[in-house]
Amino acid sequence: MPGKEGAPEGPTIKHNVYEGGDVQSLGFQNADGSESTVGVLVPGEYDFGIAEREEHVTATTGKLQLGEKSKETVRAIPNGFIFTKGTPITFIIEETTSYLCNYFETPPVAKDSPAK
């Protein structure tokens, strides 16, 4: 158990709170060193500013709808969206929605793409 004497250190988990508590997430580092968050958004409209790195956001329950600022700048993926660095991140949430967000400093290479 993390924190016990002689026990291995566990992953660092960061609790994030936004929009007065209407959006909350847990951030963590994956085994490969990349970062992810899992979280919940309650109904509302959210503007998270500009993506500082590539973000793949996928709904695990509920539905993610793009806000007006994001509609022309993102790519859809099953149950979610890819926000490239420098694009606005906005959502309209109509029902409580859980999500997974994976962050990438450089865009990942598709598994079926030839390596360069």
Image (tube, helix red, strand yellow):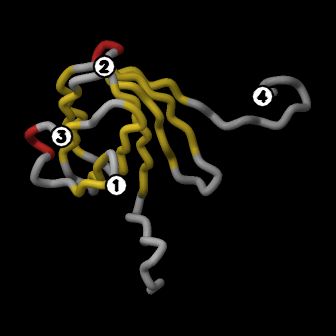
- The first of marks 2 and 3 along the sequence is 2
* Mark 4 lies on residue: 2
Instruction: Tell me the SS state at disc 4.
Output: loop
Secondary element at image label 3: strand
Residue 110, x across and y down, in percent: 43, 71
Q: CA distance from mark 3 to mark 1?
A: 16 Å
Separation of marks 3 and 4 at Cα, in angstroms: 38 Å
- Spot occupied by residue 99 in the image (x, y as percentages of width and height): 40, 35
Q: Up-down: is 79 above or below 20? A: below
Nearest-to-viewer mark from 3 and 4 = 3
- Which amino acid is tagged 4? Pro
Q: Residue sitting at 31 percent across and 55 percent down?
A: 77
Q: From what the image shows, is residue 11 above or below residue 18?
A: below
Nearer-N-terminus badge (1/2): 2
Q: Which residue is mark 2?
A: 42
Measured Cα–Cα span from mark 2 to mark 3? 15 Å
At x 36%, y 50%, the residue is 56
N-terminal of the pair, mark 2 or mark 4, is 4
Along the line of sight, the residue nearer the viewer: 36 or 58: 58
N-term mark: 4 or 1: 4
Q: Is residue 29 left or right of residue 7?
A: left
Q: Residue 21 in the image: x percent, y percent? A: 35, 14
3 left or right of 92?
right
Asked if the residue under mark 1 is in contact with the one under mark 4, i.e. CB atoms within 8 Å, the reply is no
Q: Mark 1 sits on what residue?
A: 54
Please name the amino acid that badge 1 sits on. Glu
Q: 6 or 36, which is in the foreground? A: 36
Residue 13, picture quadrant = top right
Q: Which residue is mark 3?
A: 66
- Identify the mark nearer the N-term, 3 or 1: 1
- Type of amino acid under label 3: Leu
